[in-house]
Amino acid sequence: MEQAAVQEKHRRRAVKPLGQSDAVDRYRFLQLGLFTLRTGPLLILLILIAAVAATTPVFRTGENVGNVLSQTSVISILALGQLLVIVTRGIDLSVGSTIALSSVVGALLFRDGYSTAIVIAAILATGAGVGLFNGLAFVWGRIPHAFIVTLATLSAVRGIALWAASGTLIFGMPGAVQTVGGDRVSWIPYASFVVLGLALAVVGLTTKLVWGRWLYAVGGNPDAARRAGIPVNRVLVTVYVLSGLSAGVGGLLTAGLTNAGSPNYGELAELDAIAAVIIGGAAFAGGRGNVGNALVGALTIGVIRNALNLHNVDAFVQLMVIGAVILLAVEADVIRGRLEGRLRVAQAARHG
């Protein structure tokens, strides 16, 4: 009996309950891990830039930086619209086709002698119109997920563009469109100023207006948002209109850069936009994501492609690298979700 009592005493000394100091250490460790994951997209971009700059001196030149900014401008603009959609648990697969249709509409109108203002308005209206159709079809058609609607319009809108352009490239764009899409101030493309302006506008929408709070509430829990009196359907239609409008702006920049409209523009652009948003830390589950990280994701894709081009890496390998980066970003999102859950438990225990 005495030996059993001694053994039990030693066992109790060896297995101590989690003390306050241990709980604090665990809480701080979880906070550090979560902070690292949240700042991960920016850290990865900075490390990537430093590595490429060290291995390829051409990367550091103003001309090349301008090329990166120019090449990522359309992805960045699409990512801004896609961000709003993904925050609401949706997806917009039609933005690449919308780029093609909007550029074709602009080229046809310019060829027929319409003014610069009408051409620009038509390009933007085409994008917004496709977005409005997506939103209304999704909401009022009671379709289970926006994936189905936008997958349909991805095909249909591309078909309309091919029909309208007779499958050919249509040359000619107003001078103002060419300037915005292709010209630069020193080494900085005008398109970068468009990206900056739209980014600030989206920041204002999401942080300064009640609509922004509605947006994240709908993404976080649509049923709870409805019970709280939030006009969920109106919010959903609005985000698809804005996504379509961003694709129209992308079509404007693409048409200006090439001085043409084409039914083949924007192929796979929707995948780049989605990848940029996910790399930037947004979640397909909705309710999370911000403008800064979406732009970081777009720049990450641009820097990776530019670096691989400078190193003469095959284009097929580039696709594989981008795919691997997306998978890592999704896995980081899964880990972040687990850490957030553990952090909430640790916080409750700390204050319990």
Image (cartoon, rainbow, N blue to C red):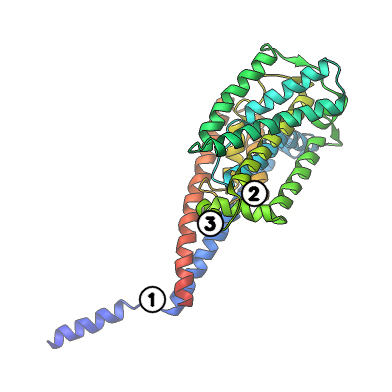
Residue marked by disc 3: 227
Earlier residue among tags 1 and 3: 1
The vertical placement of 325 against 263, above or below, is: below
- Give me the disc on residue 18: 1
Label 3 – label 2 distance at C-alpha? 31 Å
Q: Is residue 114 visible?
A: yes
Q: Mark 1, mark 3: which one is toward the viewer?
A: 3
Q: Mark 3, mark 2: which one is toward the viewer?
A: 3
The vertical placement of 230 against 98, above or below, is: below
The picture places residue 123, in percent across and down from the top left corner, at: 76, 28
- Quarter holding the N terminus is bottom left
Residue at image coords 73%, 46%? 199
Element at badge 3?
helix
Earlier residue among tags 3 and 2: 3
- Quarter holding the C terminus is bottom left
- Give me the disc on residue 293: 2
Which one is in front, 254 or 299?
A: 254
The picture places residue 134, in percent across and down from the top left corner, at: 60, 34
Q: Amino acid at mark 3?
A: Arg
Q: Amino acid at mark 1?
A: Leu
Residue at image coords 47%, 75%? 350
Element at badge 2?
helix
Tell me: 268 left or right of 26: right
